[in-house]
Amino acid sequence: MSKHAAIESDELAADRTGRAAEAVERLTRWRDDFPTPGVRFADLTPVFADAEGFRTVVDCLASCGPDADLVAGVDARGFLIGAAVAASLGTGVLAVRKAGKLPPPVITREYQLEYGTAALEIPADGVPLAGKRILLLDDVLATGGTLAAAADLFTQAGAEVIAAAVVLELTFLDGRARQGHYPVTSIVKV
Protein backbone atom coordinates (compact mmCIF):
# COMPACT_ATOMS: atom_id res chain seq x y z
CA MET A 1 0.00 0.00 0.00
CA SER A 2 1.31 3.49 -0.74
CA LYS A 3 0.29 6.94 0.31
CA HIS A 4 -1.64 7.17 -2.94
CA ALA A 5 -3.29 3.75 -2.79
CA ALA A 6 -6.53 3.20 -4.66
CA ILE A 7 -9.69 2.76 -2.66
CA GLU A 8 -10.26 -0.92 -2.05
CA SER A 9 -13.49 -2.85 -2.05
CA ASP A 10 -15.39 -3.53 1.17
CA GLU A 11 -14.84 -7.24 0.56
CA LEU A 12 -11.04 -6.87 0.42
CA ALA A 13 -11.04 -4.66 3.52
CA ALA A 14 -13.17 -7.15 5.46
CA ASP A 15 -10.93 -10.04 4.41
CA ARG A 16 -7.79 -8.18 5.52
CA THR A 17 -9.34 -7.25 8.86
CA GLY A 18 -10.57 -10.80 9.38
CA ARG A 19 -7.11 -12.26 8.76
CA ALA A 20 -5.52 -9.74 11.14
CA ALA A 21 -8.14 -10.38 13.84
CA GLU A 22 -7.65 -14.15 13.56
CA ALA A 23 -3.90 -13.78 14.04
CA VAL A 24 -4.33 -11.46 17.03
CA GLU A 25 -6.88 -13.75 18.69
CA ARG A 26 -4.79 -16.87 18.07
CA LEU A 27 -1.38 -15.49 19.07
CA THR A 28 -2.00 -13.01 21.92
CA ARG A 29 -0.60 -14.21 25.24
CA TRP A 30 -2.70 -13.21 28.28
CA ARG A 31 -1.16 -12.79 31.77
CA ASP A 32 -3.22 -12.14 34.90
CA ASP A 33 -1.92 -9.86 37.67
CA PHE A 34 0.71 -8.22 35.50
CA PRO A 35 2.16 -5.62 35.88
CA THR A 36 0.18 -5.27 39.12
CA PRO A 37 -2.45 -7.39 40.89
CA GLY A 38 -5.87 -7.13 39.27
CA VAL A 39 -4.56 -6.19 35.80
CA ARG A 40 -4.83 -8.67 32.93
CA PHE A 41 -2.02 -8.00 30.44
CA ALA A 42 -2.35 -8.67 26.71
CA ASP A 43 1.08 -9.55 25.36
CA LEU A 44 1.15 -9.04 21.60
CA THR A 45 4.79 -10.13 21.27
CA PRO A 46 3.83 -13.47 19.64
CA VAL A 47 1.65 -11.61 17.11
CA PHE A 48 4.54 -9.35 16.10
CA ALA A 49 7.00 -12.27 16.01
CA ASP A 50 4.81 -14.17 13.55
CA ALA A 51 5.63 -12.98 10.01
CA GLU A 52 2.12 -13.44 8.59
CA GLY A 53 0.42 -12.14 11.74
CA PHE A 54 2.59 -9.02 11.78
CA ARG A 55 2.07 -8.38 8.05
CA THR A 56 -1.72 -8.60 8.32
CA VAL A 57 -1.74 -6.31 11.38
CA VAL A 58 0.44 -3.76 9.58
CA ASP A 59 -1.75 -3.85 6.46
CA CYS A 60 -4.88 -3.41 8.55
CA LEU A 61 -3.48 -0.46 10.52
CA ALA A 62 -2.07 1.21 7.40
CA SER A 63 -5.54 1.22 5.85
CA CYS A 64 -6.73 3.49 8.70
CA GLY A 65 -4.71 6.49 7.50
CA PRO A 66 -3.74 6.26 3.84
CA ASP A 67 -3.57 10.08 3.62
CA ALA A 68 -1.41 10.57 6.71
CA ASP A 69 1.69 12.75 6.43
CA LEU A 70 3.30 11.12 9.45
CA VAL A 71 2.74 7.98 11.52
CA ALA A 72 3.20 8.25 15.28
CA GLY A 73 3.81 5.16 17.41
CA VAL A 74 3.35 5.30 21.18
CA ASP A 75 6.11 4.00 23.47
CA ALA A 76 7.06 1.20 23.24
CA ARG A 77 5.19 -1.46 21.24
CA GLY A 78 3.70 1.33 19.13
CA PHE A 79 7.23 1.93 17.81
CA LEU A 80 7.20 -1.50 16.16
CA ILE A 81 3.89 -1.11 14.40
CA GLY A 82 4.42 2.60 13.74
CA ALA A 83 7.65 2.03 11.84
CA ALA A 84 6.19 -0.80 9.78
CA VAL A 85 3.02 1.15 8.94
CA ALA A 86 5.04 4.25 8.01
CA ALA A 87 7.19 2.18 5.65
CA SER A 88 4.05 0.71 4.13
CA LEU A 89 2.48 4.15 3.63
CA GLY A 90 5.66 5.85 2.46
CA THR A 91 5.67 8.37 5.33
CA GLY A 92 7.99 9.20 8.19
CA VAL A 93 7.48 7.87 11.69
CA LEU A 94 7.70 9.65 15.03
CA ALA A 95 8.14 7.87 18.35
CA VAL A 96 5.96 9.25 21.14
CA ARG A 97 8.32 8.68 24.09
CA LYS A 98 7.94 8.19 27.81
CA ALA A 99 9.04 11.21 29.86
CA GLY A 100 12.77 11.72 30.19
CA LYS A 101 13.79 9.86 27.03
CA LEU A 102 14.14 12.88 24.70
CA PRO A 103 16.50 15.84 25.01
CA PRO A 104 14.82 19.22 25.60
CA PRO A 105 12.92 21.07 24.42
CA VAL A 106 9.94 18.73 24.51
CA ILE A 107 6.17 18.94 24.75
CA THR A 108 4.94 16.85 27.68
CA ARG A 109 1.51 15.51 28.61
CA GLU A 110 0.76 13.64 31.85
CA TYR A 111 -2.06 11.09 31.97
CA GLN A 112 -3.67 8.35 34.07
CA LEU A 113 -3.09 4.65 33.48
CA GLU A 114 -5.36 1.92 34.81
CA TYR A 115 -2.58 1.19 37.34
CA GLY A 116 -0.87 4.59 37.92
CA THR A 117 0.21 7.78 36.17
CA ALA A 118 2.75 8.51 33.45
CA ALA A 119 3.81 11.17 30.95
CA LEU A 120 4.53 11.20 27.21
CA GLU A 121 6.72 13.55 25.19
CA ILE A 122 7.46 14.58 21.62
CA PRO A 123 10.15 16.96 20.37
CA ALA A 124 9.21 20.64 20.59
CA ASP A 125 11.56 21.45 17.70
CA GLY A 126 13.49 19.69 14.97
CA VAL A 127 10.45 17.87 13.59
CA PRO A 128 8.01 20.17 11.78
CA LEU A 129 4.57 19.11 13.02
CA ALA A 130 2.35 22.15 12.38
CA GLY A 131 -0.26 21.28 9.78
CA LYS A 132 0.76 17.60 9.55
CA ARG A 133 -1.91 14.88 9.34
CA ILE A 134 -1.06 12.23 11.93
CA LEU A 135 -2.01 8.54 12.06
CA LEU A 136 -1.61 7.64 15.73
CA LEU A 137 -0.89 3.98 16.60
CA ASP A 138 -0.63 1.96 19.79
CA ASP A 139 -0.86 -1.71 20.62
CA VAL A 140 -3.71 -1.72 23.16
CA LEU A 141 -6.53 0.69 24.00
CA ALA A 142 -7.40 0.18 27.67
CA THR A 143 -8.49 3.16 29.77
CA GLY A 144 -7.60 5.48 26.88
CA GLY A 145 -5.24 7.80 28.73
CA THR A 146 -2.15 6.97 26.72
CA LEU A 147 -3.75 7.45 23.31
CA ALA A 148 -5.57 10.62 24.38
CA ALA A 149 -2.36 12.10 25.84
CA ALA A 150 -0.48 11.35 22.63
CA ALA A 151 -3.23 13.00 20.56
CA ASP A 152 -3.11 16.05 22.84
CA LEU A 153 0.64 16.36 22.22
CA PHE A 154 0.12 16.57 18.47
CA THR A 155 -2.74 19.04 18.81
CA GLN A 156 -0.54 21.23 21.01
CA ALA A 157 2.18 21.05 18.32
CA GLY A 158 -0.29 22.25 15.65
CA ALA A 159 -0.81 18.89 13.96
CA GLU A 160 -4.10 17.11 13.28
CA VAL A 161 -4.72 13.53 14.38
CA ILE A 162 -6.76 12.19 11.45
CA ALA A 163 -7.14 8.69 12.89
CA ALA A 164 -5.99 6.45 15.70
CA ALA A 165 -5.71 2.69 15.52
CA VAL A 166 -4.83 -0.11 17.90
CA VAL A 167 -4.36 -3.83 17.63
CA LEU A 168 -6.48 -4.72 20.65
CA GLU A 169 -9.21 -2.79 22.51
CA LEU A 170 -10.32 -3.73 26.03
CA THR A 171 -13.87 -2.41 25.69
CA PHE A 172 -14.84 -2.98 29.35
CA LEU A 173 -12.43 -0.16 30.32
CA ASP A 174 -14.23 2.32 28.01
CA GLY A 175 -11.03 3.97 26.73
CA ARG A 176 -12.73 4.92 23.47
CA ALA A 177 -14.84 7.48 25.38
CA ARG A 178 -11.67 9.44 26.26
CA GLN A 179 -10.63 9.92 22.63
CA GLY A 180 -11.07 13.08 20.59
CA HIS A 181 -12.98 13.69 17.37
CA TYR A 182 -10.81 11.38 15.27
CA PRO A 183 -11.90 7.89 14.22
CA VAL A 184 -10.52 5.08 16.37
CA THR A 185 -10.09 1.62 14.84
CA SER A 186 -9.26 -1.58 16.68
CA ILE A 187 -8.53 -4.89 15.00
CA VAL A 188 -9.89 -6.94 17.92
CA LYS A 189 -12.26 -5.85 20.68
CA VAL A 190 -12.39 -7.82 23.93
Image: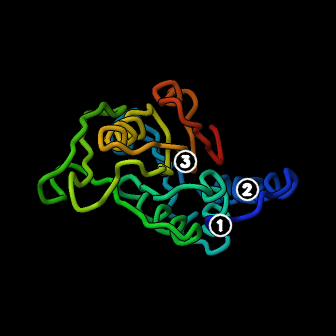
Q: Is residue 167 above or below residue 114?
A: below
Q: What residue lies at 21% left-to-right and 45% top-to-bottom? A: 107
Question: Looking at the picture, which amino acid does disc 1 mark?
Answer: Gly
Q: What mark, if any, has residue 22 been given in the picture?
A: 2
Q: What residue lies at 35% left-to-right and 36% top-to-bottom? A: 152
Q: In the rendered image, which residue does mark 3 sit on? A: 166
Q: Is residue 117 above or below residue 139?
A: above
Q: Quadrant of residue 27?
A: bottom right
Whole-angstrom CA distance, mark 3 to mark 2, is 15 Å
Q: Which image quadrant: the N terminus?
A: bottom right
How far across and down, in percent of the image, does residue 189 sit?
Answer: 64, 39
Question: Looking at the picture, which amino acid does disc 3 mark?
Answer: Val
Point out the tag, 3 or 2, that comes first from the N-terminus: 2
Closer-to-camera residue (62/20): 62
Question: Looking at the picture, which amino acid does disc 2 mark?
Answer: Glu
Point out the tag, 3 or 1, that comes first from the N-terminus: 1
Q: Quadrant of residue 188?
A: top right
Q: Which image quadrant: the C terminus?
A: top right
Q: Is residue 107 above or below residue 45?
A: above
* Cβ atoms under marks 3 and 1 closer than 8 Å: no
How far across and down, in percent of the image, does residue 50 sit?
Answer: 60, 72
Q: Quadrant of residue 88?
A: bottom right
Q: In the rendered image, which residue does mark 1 sit on? A: 53
Q: Secondary structure at mark 1?
A: helix
